[in-house]
Image (cartoon, rainbow, N blue to C red):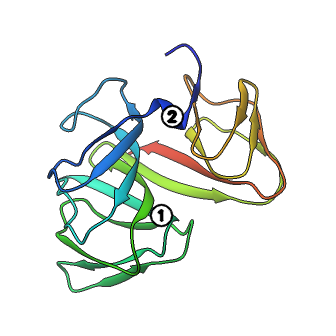
Amino acid sequence: MNSPIIRAQDCPPQPWKNGLGTTREIAVHPAGAGGDDFLWRVSIAEVDSAAPFSSFAGIDRHIALLDGAGFTMTLDDGRNHALTTPFAPFAFAGEARVAVALADGPTRDFNLMVRRARALGEVKVWQQPGTYPLDPTIVLVYAARGEIDTDAGTLRVGDAWLAREAAAGHITLREGALAFAIDIRRAA
């Protein structure tokens, strides 16, 4: 990959780990890592049935609704979470058994997975127009809504900017834009 910009159309669908849905991998670190050896992974899942989530032992997961009416997640610890507010991240353990009840039809959601023994992750929501400085812990910026300007070009909905080395510089959110900034820090 020569450009730090990942275009949405360049991310083909692939089956979920459990085979019950599809996802589009946006980025994985280290590049080319598989399910057992990634440090972090960002993807977009398409949820069109009440299929349970795949299990990812040792992984912290963060999920945010992008499109659709959403769904209610029932976790095996008895918690229920209504993922019905767009762009509001929710964190949970990857090994949790999660049942899904769709609110009203198919949805798409943003996913960050982080190997908890090695790193801590956070999905920061940036939605005020203007310029945002990038610090070394920001590894990826995803355009969830609107257009975002980077030194490498403009991100449109579904595109992402991948930091190759310690992030420096800035990005600019245009009016109406919303970005997910992925913050990854090494575990202590």
- Relative image position of residue 156 (x, y in whole percent): 67, 41
Residue at x 35% of width, y 47% of height: 114
Q: Position of residue 70 (x, y in %)?
A: 43, 74
Q: Residue furthest top?
A: 2
* Mark 1 to mark 2 CA distance (whole Å): 20 Å
| The quarter of the displayed image where residue 41 is located | top left
State whether residue 121 is above or below residue 29: below
Above or below: residue 121 compared with residue 105: above
The residue tagged 2 is 9
Location of mark 1 (residue)? 64
Q: Determine whether 180 is above or below 78 in the image.
A: above
Left-right relation of 163 to 24: right
Identify the mark at residue 21; answer none if there is no mark: none
| Residue under the point 20% across and 52% down | 58
In front: 169, or 22? 22
* In this view, the mark in front (1 or 2): 2
Q: Position of residue 101 (x, y in %)?
A: 29, 79
Are the residues flagged by discs 1 and 2 in contact, CB closer than 8 Å?
Answer: no
